[in-house]
Amino acid sequence: EKAELERFRGQPTKTADGIEKIIGANIGNPDDAVAAMEHDAEAIGLFRTEFLFMDAKQLPSEDEQFEAYKKAAVTAKGASVIIRTLDVGGDKEIAYLHMKKEDNPFMGYRAVRYCLGNPDQYKVQLRALLRASAFGKIMIMIPLVTAVEEVRAVKALVEECKAELRDKNIEFNEDIKVGVMMETPSASLIADRLACEADFFSIGTNDLIGYTMCADRGNDRVGYLYSVYYPSVLRSIKNIIECGVRAGIMVGMCGEAAADPLLEPLLISFGLEEFSMSAPSVLRARKTISLWTKKEADELAERALACSTIEEVKAILTEAAR
Ligand code: PEP
Ligand code: MG
């Protein structure tokens, strides 16, 4: 099996009928980018920057962040590197930020909400990202978006940071892309509107499943509800991809589901462009994608979307698996 997968090393990612796809890797620090390239990833589809913050004793400085983002960008050698701004809160705690305890942290002051509430701190990260964008294809991604206003507010801060850098004659990519992480039911329901504001989408199925099904993956008693195969979750994913494709923006997926061979044909059918996953899964995913034509994937998707229950969906996808 391993030798069989090696055939796909260095090859472009394509469906059986030649539609080009990109397989990215998810990373938590710039050193992971080296491993990602060794595993033959074609891009970095998600750089979770919170680890940079969690591994430190105080807020990493603009220069420290710049070095980390630059290293990831340089390591990717011109391939795109989607860097997600600080996704703090929920289950991710950073002691030195002294965030107030909340009764319901997953519904609380986290991610882009926290960042927009602390704009001076957020701008340190945005300036570091802009400066690093002079050294590779960095794209900025906003986590936990629920409303158009949040995207506009972040873009306004990015513009402020650009103006500051211009004043100081510091180089950056004027055309840096700012995208939205699609991981809430609200974002999914307004995907058509968000697609007008965002340069790209990336679907975060880990949170999207939890928020859509109102189920905490870590809670045994409701764990059975935490699945990408529920019809509601499949419809949500389909809507996000179709809205992005219709608006002509890149749509990727960086949640665990992107590496699910049962789901991948559906993602091909919906029109997903970038599949981002943990690095060791790259070659396996390239192989799975190579086994499906768009037409076959469409036929399977039509049958899967016609199901009412998770059991029917799973049965159809399992039987069709290649
Ligand atoms: C997700 O929610 O799917 C995701 C990729 O982000 P994280 O797992 O870091 O919340
Ligand atoms: Mg998430």
Image: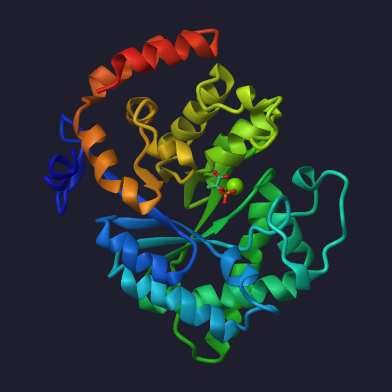
Pick the quarter of the image with the C terminus: top left
Looking at the image, is 98 positioned above or below residue 249?
below
Can you see residue 241?
Answer: yes
Look at 77% across and 73% down and name the residue there. 96
* Residue 221 x/y as whole percent: 71, 25
Look at 18% across and 42% down and name the residue there. 5
* Residue 192 x/y as whole percent: 55, 35
Q: What colour scheme governs how the chains and residues are painted in the rendered image of this protein?
A: rainbow
Q: Quadrant of residue 292?
A: top left
* Residue 141 x/y as whole percent: 53, 57
Viewer-side residue, 239 vs 22: 22
Pick the quarter of the image with the N terminus: top left
Viewer-side residue, 72 vs 139: 72
Determine whether, in the image, residue 178 is placed left or right of residue 133: right
* Residue 78 x/y as whole percent: 29, 68
- In the image as oriented, which residue stretches furthest toward the bottom? 168
Determine whether, in the image, residue 137 is placed left or right of residue 254: left
Determine whether, in the image, residue 26 is placed left or right of residue 143: left
Q: How many marks?
A: 0
Look at 40% across and 42% down and name the residue there. 248
Look at 62% across and 83% down and name the residue there. 61
Can you see residue 185?
Answer: no
